[in-house]
Amino acid sequence: MSTLKKQAMHGVKWTSLSTGIKSILQIIQLVILARFLSPEDFGLIAIVMVVIGFSQLFMDIGISNAIIHKQNITDIQLSSLYWLNILSGLVLTVIVFIIAPFIAIFYHEEAIIPLLRLLSLSFFINAIGNQYRVLLRKELKFNILAKVEVLAGIGAFICSVTLAVQGFGAYSLVFATLVNVTILNTILLINGLKSHKPRLVYHYKDIKSFLTFGLYQVGQNSIVYFNNQFDVVLIGKLLGAEALGIYSLTKQLVMRPSQIINPIITGVTFPIMAKVQDDLPRLKSIYLKIINYLASINFPIYILMIILANSLVPLILGKKWIDAVELFQILSVYALVRSTTSPAGTLLLSRGRADIGFWWSIGEFSLMPLIIYIGSHWGIVGVSLGLLIFQLIMLLPNWYFIVKKMCFATFVEYFSVQVKPLIAALISVISIYAIINNSLELSQILKVIIVSGISTSSYFLISLWLNRNFVEEIKSLVVKKVHR
């Protein structure tokens, strides 16, 4: 096995462990908070997190991925970039603190002012350790990063649940976020200072190329972020905090699987793809494997979610959320499609073409607000249908203008690695559900457990025929782990 592949497997192992633990904590947190917080609380948090998430894009001016892309970086460059990051974090904290009342006026929700001002502190705290997080990724030291993230996640979980039970409402999530970033960045700083102590220098000329790369990245990410969050912005404005709370919580739940799975694979493979960016046949091979793995894992999960929605929603969120079943199903199809199109951005970054991603995002941004606005006339279900239709329309352009041009993957090569796991998942899940649902009277939880268990086994058997390479890769990983 090549050194890069060994490092990739090591990275996947640690990133999977970290993401798995954090996600389990987040799901348990979501289940608990859905029973203590109102839809309006979730709506307020959704509005606040849109503002915080967008502002955070400007925190390092897009230089994190530039650090990973550039293979040779001097100590002067790292020091200059570190102090630029600190300054950006401080400026963003001040800006959000000042504009909080104006955002409250836009939404007619005065309650978000203190929430926004508290969370604005996260910018400065994140700036302290951000560069050390990036360097750990660049050096493929995912084991250290995983341990720190898990520790911070545990702290945030304890904080959020404790405060929610005591009736702190939306503040339980705000303080949990601050606890998370404080633990994470304090440990990253202490650990990072052992290998790199920023010098008190700032040389603009030495980091100009980073900023050029980074500004395109900021532009692209800003537009992508608005594309992804415009539904929240408009629902909060047009339909109110309660409708936004239902939509936001359902979307969080639905997007969770791909938010767990995709970063594990793309986060590990981005530095590796950057290292082989000039070897196009090898880059294409790696990228097609990424898409196949993502489809092979995400597709059966989302099809299960769609089929079992009537049982899953009341089980996870409680019976008061039963009206969200249709929304849950539509957003699950949307998330399934997005799970294999979103990694195109990683491909562009590995080739150093953040500029293409920027203009692509501009094109999407010109259409997305109109689609969401039209959909909002039919409520939150209309918005979700609009998002799904738009995502389906963009499948072909995504391949032609990004994937084909960056790694020369043909139409058949690109879509065949997705169709095989899709067919396997549809056959296994739908057939098993039809048999069990029509022949047995089961409680909701038993139905979920039995259908999920049998469908998973059936899926892997069918994949031996349709998607054998993926199954063989999984088997090899399991065998190696057992032998160790």
Image: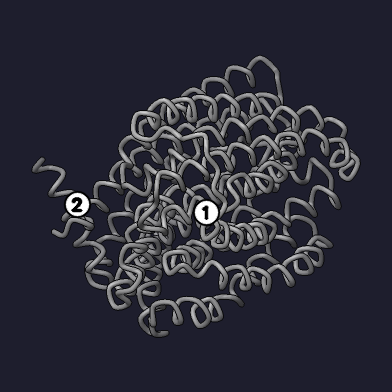
Q: Residues within 10 Å of mark 2 (few under 14, many from 20)?
A: few
Q: Indicate whether 460 appears above or below 82.
A: below
Q: Quadrant of residue 196?
A: top left
Relative to residue 472, is residue 280 drawn left or right? right
Q: Residues within 10 Å of mark 1 (few under 14, many from 20)?
A: some
Residues 238 and 51: in front is: 51
- Residue at x 79%, y 69% (from the top left corner): 370
x, y percent for residue 98:
82, 35
Q: Are marks 1 and 2 in contact (CB under 8 Å)?
A: no
Observer able to see residue 399: yes
Secondary-structure class at tag 1? helix
x, y percent for residue 81:
52, 45
- Residue at x 52%, y 57% (from the top left corner): 210
x, y percent for residue 394:
59, 75
Secondary-structure class at tag 2? helix
Observer able to see residue 323: no
Residue under numbered circle 1: 207
Mark closer to the chain start, 1 or 2 = 1
x, y percent for residue 116:
75, 33
**Separation (CA) of disc 1 from disc 2:** 41 Å
- Residue at x 56%, y 24% (from the top left corner): 179
Q: Indicate whether 424 appears above or below 452.
A: below
Residues 140 and 149: in front is: 140
Q: Which quadrant is home to the C terminus?
A: top left
* Residue type pointed to by label 2: Leu
Relative to residue 365, is residue 378 drawn left or right? right
Residue under numbered circle 2: 477
User: What is the number of callouts on the image?
Assistant: 2
* Residue type pointed to by label 1: Ile
